[in-house]
Amino acid sequence: MATQDEGTRGTARRALLGAAVLGATGTVVGIPGTASAASRTQGHGGGLKSLPVPTIIGHRGASGYRPEHTFGSYQLALDMGADIIEAGDLVPTKDGHIVCRHEPEIGGTTDVASHAEFKDRKRTKVLDGVSVTGWFTEDFTLAELKRLRAIERIPANRPHNTLYDGRWEIPTFEEVLKWQDEQTRRRGKQVWIYPETKHPTYFRKQGLGLEERVAKLLRKYGKDKADSPVILQSFEPTSIQRLNKLVGNPLVVLLDAAGTRPYDFVESGDPRTVDDLITPKGLKEIAGYAQGIGPTLNLIIPRDADGRLTKPTTLVRDAHKAGLILHPYTMRNENPFLPAEYRKGTDADGYGDPFGAFRTYFATGIDGVFTDNPDTGLLARADFRNA
């Protein structure tokens, strides 16, 4: 249950997000962080209401074209015109810095395996109940991680991305915040980011709490307000609840597949699953501490046994009724990731018909979507608006 202060803060943030749903635009004067709840709905650069709807979110940058969570990927997504850049998935180092990697295990996203000096760092750990073998960020200092270079995570689907293997280092979250400011100045337009706290329960048990570290950096750069161009997300509701007490930023609860349980629920013995969270009761509870949800696309339109789309659920309507926005994930151009009716051929790296899939998802009333291919998403949005 949110305190009165948390509820006031949440109301202010929901007002901003609600304006985004309506597609309002405008520029207003920035308000200090100590302003009242009513005044905090006014943001520099228009706040969230300045974002186009449906919002196109560059998933880990433009990861369909460059190795994910690199400045190469982030920059390309921005150059393509993405409304928000998901920079990045946040995990800690041994010495408490925050870096951007898809997972704490980095064997699949960096060249660490080719570094003989780190051969003895390979471990088998239990990550959210699953045994994982590899190299983990929490076993490296930042200086050590900076010796590594990023590689393509899914080369079978994106062999063209391997051309860029070894080109970029692992960015820190602080570097991302500086890059955001630099790009905003250079472009004369506010750049938005959408970072995620990864496995926060796992890291908290190791004494590497993510939320406090993220909040400290946001405060340092003056980006911890309701009108700040930073949306925070997590698959663990308690991480979002903790962030709600630390910062004023818009907050989003990510939702995995139907029937799954957030890992913080597993740890605490909470028996609820995603199915419970997407009921009107569950959504109303989420709206008490967050402003949006990020469901998997299959929660918007389920697929049948053949991978074809079925009837849309009521999730969009129910979430909007609770005052929440929806930014589902993830649209990708390659055949294996698309609904069966939008695939063309069977090549793992072949493109299907993502425009048709985008059109179908947009028609449900979603407020935005994460995509590895921001250019495709932007063209699809233009088609949808002009239809």
Image (spheres, rainbow, N blue to C red):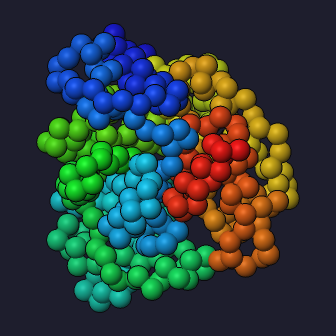
Tell me if 224 is positioned left or right of 327 in this view: left
Please say if 244 is above or below 321. Answer: below
Please say if 73 is above or below 164. Answer: above
User: Which of 90 and 177 lies nearest the eye of the viewer?
Assistant: 177
Check the image and name the residue furthest to the left: 220
Q: Quadrant of residue 88?
A: bottom left
Please say if 194 is above or below 331. Answer: above
Tell me if 235 is positioned left or right of 307 in this view: left
Residue plotted at (61% across, 37% down): 366
Residue plotted at (48% across, 66% down): 63
Q: Position of residue 218 (x, y in %)?
A: 22, 41
Q: Where is residue 71 in the image (x, y as percent from the top left)?
A: 32, 67
Q: In which quarter of the image is residue 319?
A: top right
User: Which of 216 and 350 lies nearest the eye of the viewer?
Assistant: 350
- From this viewpoint, is residue 231 visible? yes
User: Which of 190 and 274 lies nearest the eye of the viewer?
Assistant: 190
Tag count in the figure? 0
Residue plotted at (78% across, 71% down): 344
Q: Where is residue 138 in the image (x, y as percent from the top left)?
A: 29, 62
Q: Position of residue 154 (x, y in %)?
A: 55, 74
Tell me if 292 is positioned left or right of 207 in this view: right
Q: In which quarter of the image is residue 115?
A: bottom left
- From this viewpoint, is residue 298 visible? no
Quarter of the N terminus within the rendering:
top left
Residue plotted at (46% across, 36% down): 252
Check the image and name the residue furthest to the front: 386
Quarter of the C terminus within the rendering:
top right
